[in-house]
Amino acid sequence: MLNVPFVPEINQKWYLRKLETGCWPQHLSGPNDGWLTTEECGELVSTLSGFTNGSDCFFRFSEWRFHGQGKPLFFRGTLNELNEFRMTSGYKISSEYWWPPNRNWCVCSDYDHAFTIVGGSNELISTLLTSSILECLQVTPQTRVNYFVPLP
């Protein structure tokens, strides 16, 4: 049995050091890499809609998500269509990158990360930071955002 203390220092590296096999135990799982829940995606879509002026957006899906031909897949559609696709496609996928034609914002949900990054105006970021559904942290270009972040 793995005794897991409740402290902020717990991260993927901590677990991997503690787990002899390097695998997650049966009833304990790691982060959902590159995946927003339906509720999180809905909240993000709702917020971004206010900064999109009703225009279509672009969506880039990673080639491996669709067992593709080795090329990324690009689509154009509304933010609501993205959320509907996620719920009805039967795939557990998120678009890897999404952005409007005017490039006022960009979302990155890379499958190798346990987080999603949103870039945009101060007004957009302030709105996201007040969400009761999304867990948001404000970062700068100097903020390290990978598994090697030093712990305090």
Image (tube, rainbow, N blue to C red):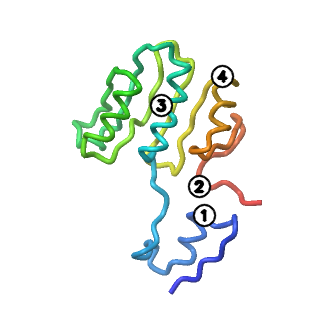
- In this figure, which residue is indicated by the disc labeled 1? 11
Query: What is the secondary structure assignment of the residue under circle 1?
Result: loop
| 68 lies above or below 57 | below
Quarter of the image where one finds residue 32: bottom left
- In this figure, which residue is indicated by the disc labeled 3? 45
- Mark earlier in primary sequence (3, 1): 1
The residue lying at 65 percent from left, 30 percent from top is 127
Residue nearest the viewer, comparing 3 with 61:
3
Q: Label 3: how many residues lie within 10 Å, few (<14), some (14-19) or many (20+)?
A: some
Rendering coords of residue 105 (x, y %): 56, 23
- Mark earlier in primary sequence (4, 1): 1
- In this figure, which residue is indicated by the disc labeled 4? 121
Q: CA distance from mark 2 to mark 3?
A: 27 Å
Query: What is the secondary structure assignment of the residue under circle 3?
Result: helix
Name the front one of labels 3 and 4.
3
Task: Evaluate if marks 4 and 1 touch, with contact meaning CB atoms under 8 Å apart.
Answer: no
Task: Evaluate if marks 3 and 1 touch, with contact meaning CB atoms under 8 Å apart.
Answer: no
Q: CA distance from mark 3 to mark 4?
A: 16 Å
The residue lying at 54 percent from left, 21 percent from top is 50
Please name the amino acid that badge 4 sits on.
Ser
Query: What is the secondary structure assignment of the residue under circle 4?
Result: loop
Name the front one of labels 1 and 2.
1
Task: Evaluate if marks 4 and 2 touch, with contact meaning CB atoms under 8 Å apart.
Answer: no
* The residue positioned farthest toward the right in the image shown: 152
